Amino acid sequence: MAELLVWPALLAYGEAAVAYAGNARNPGALGRLATWGVRVGWLAQTALLAGQAYRADGFPWSTWASSLNLFVWLVVGAYLIWGCSPRFRLLGLAVMPFAAALLAVSYVAGGTNSGGGTAWNDVLLVIHVAFALTAFAGFTVAAGLAALELWEERLLKRHRAGILRLRLPSLLVLDRFTVATIAVSLSALTVGLLAVFARLPDHGVDLLMAGTLAAWLLYASILYLRVRSGRRALAARLALVGFASVLVLQLGLLVTHVA
Amino acid sequence: MKLLLIGTSHRLAPVEVRERVAVDPDGAAALATRLAGDGEAVCLSTCNRTEIYLAASDQLEADRRATAALAELAEIDPADLEPFLYRLEREAAAVHLFRVAAGLDSLVPGEGEILGQVRTAYERGKVGPLLDRLFSHALHTGKKVRTDTAIAESPGTTSSAAAALAAQVFGDLKGARIAIVGAGKIGRRAARRLTKRGASLSFVANRTEMRGRELADELGGETIPLEQLVGATERADILVSSTSSADVVLTKDELARALPARKGRPLLLIDLAVPRDLDPAINELADCYLYDIDDLEAVVHETARGRETEFARAESIAVEEAARFREWLATRDVVPTIASLRERAEAIRRGELAKASPRLAGLSERERNAVESLTSQIVNKLLHEPIVRLKEAAAAEDRGGPENRFEG
């Protein structure tokens, strides 16, 4: 029965995505509808995940499809921290269609079903998956923030007269949030990688691990660039490149798990 | 209890009158307590208006006392004050307060300060069920208008457009430092606008020190000679230039040399001078955003077009919320009638059940409960339609009422 919760979650995320698109053209009631869609969808997905956890024999999100389900929940959760504010509704337009599409993929691939899972005694794997997914979700939201920041920068540079009517968050606020999100996510990825290193004697290194390490290095250099040299726009562009690496890693996960 | 508003504002009264009836929050609280009597009262007093909202059973008496109180404040004869006063009742008073809270009745439409002033007046007034509902609904409306429309993002002048752009870059302007190049009238106006939004003056660079000193003293910054401008840009986040110089006072190369020390902190440059003071190529530098007078005019023009739309949307929100308030008000008026109708019906039901009790004596406890529940349901169903009609009639009567009286 818990599997059925994917439908309200999907519908609510879809409704939020459509309402955000409408709100971008005509701000107002649609924005509130979108925010409620995100909230309701996230609650439904929380219940879905709780149902999966309750019925699983081990760690329920160890498959690619189920980890995608958890990933979407983390992304929407991270977005919800700011998403209720009207000024961040344009970020919702970037995040929610993405979240709805990924949840649909997870559903089609069986990631929203209950039962199964990796044995809980592989604690290091559980820690790795949980922290790496949290980090990737954070990087996804950071990419959304960075994209918004770069767009706003472009509008300012080109003297777009209608910029004030878009009611975007200020450039510095976007920058601060991007940096903070990357910093928190990088810490989570560090824990996830340490768990992987602890498993090395038994499992060895694979390409995916190397890719994750490369993503860690990229995000660490973004933070270094931003904090030490103050290169804000470059850091925002690199956050988008970093997000591309997250997508590649997710695809890599799909390939290795299907193989 | 009837809702009544008596007040004066920038729409009817010149500043000489407004300043005489203005009171501070303590005075407003005392006035509300004094005028409430056994009813309710809230006094909203700002630099643009003094309004008294009353909920009273004797409207004429409440009106008389409020008018006398305002005349007493102004220290003039009530008859002399009369041309500057307006009076609104019921829904019209609600619409007015909702428009005020939304900033639609302000000198600068959409300004945010009024919402806080309405809240203070509400918190310090003598409120009961009617004014409590009215003011909480007004605060909700004010917030909704600011959330759902861009009315607050519509600067009407180039200096306010500059301040709005600064907020777009830096967010809260508290902590942002301003540099003024050229202490003329335009530069002063822009500096005042920015400091009003929380920014602080870092320095004034002017050819003649005395003139720069005046502005620096007024807004709390220092003065520097124009020649030291390049080195001093490190100490500014917003640079406003409005000299009468025929040449450029800051070039791209000069500014580029000063940028590394800024460590990526954005610099907003506002060039209000004609001919321009700042090299247009500065806009190509990373983290520098240069706006000249034409760019600012374009922002004002664009938002002016949008302002009408936003204003209309904000108006419709205020009217919509006032209609909701009217429905509540109408329902509230018929509540005693509905309660008495229900009481009467319940008394009849109980009486009939009592009469029939000998015939029901043989019923079990469960059957008796079923009869109780059945009779209650019949009574509720019979009353449902008349109650709905009563509420509708009250709302319709309220719509056609003579509340839209606007005097003065």
Image (cartoon, coloured by chain):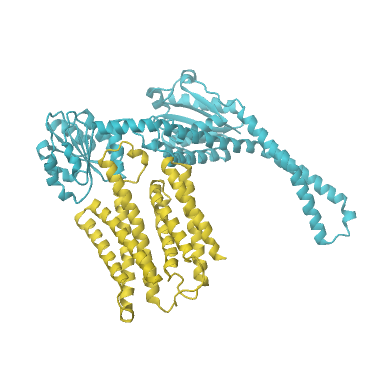
Task: Where is residue B252? Give x, y as percent.
Answer: 14, 41
Q: Quadrant of the N terminus of chain B?
A: top right
Locate residue A258 relative to residue B264 in the image: left or right. right
Which residue is farthest front? A259
Q: Look at the picture and state if A28 lies above or below A56.
A: above
Which residue is farthest right? B359
Residue B198 seen in render: no
Count the labels in the image.
0
| Nearer to us in this view, B407 or B387 | B387
Q: Look at the picture and state if A130 lies above or below B94.
A: below
Task: Where is residue A28? Give x, y as percent.
Answer: 46, 41
Q: Residue at x 49, y 36 (%)?
A: B317
Task: Where is residue B105? Give x, y as percent.
Answer: 43, 30
| Residue A238 quadrant | bottom left
Locate residue B55 relative to residue B273 in the image: left or right. right
Task: Where is residue B186? Give x, y as percent.
Answer: 23, 29
| Nearer to us in this view, B52 or A136 | A136
Q: Residue at x 22, y 46 (%)?
A: B287
Q: Look at the picture and state if B86 lies above or below A79.
A: above
Locate residue A135 relative to residue B124 in the image: left or right. left
Which residue is farthest bottom? A202
Hue of chain B?
A: cyan
Q: Look at the picture and state if A46 lies above or below B318.
A: below
| Nearer to us in this view, B307 or A240 | A240
Residue B70 seen in render: yes
Q: Any idea which chain is the yellow one in this picture?
A: A
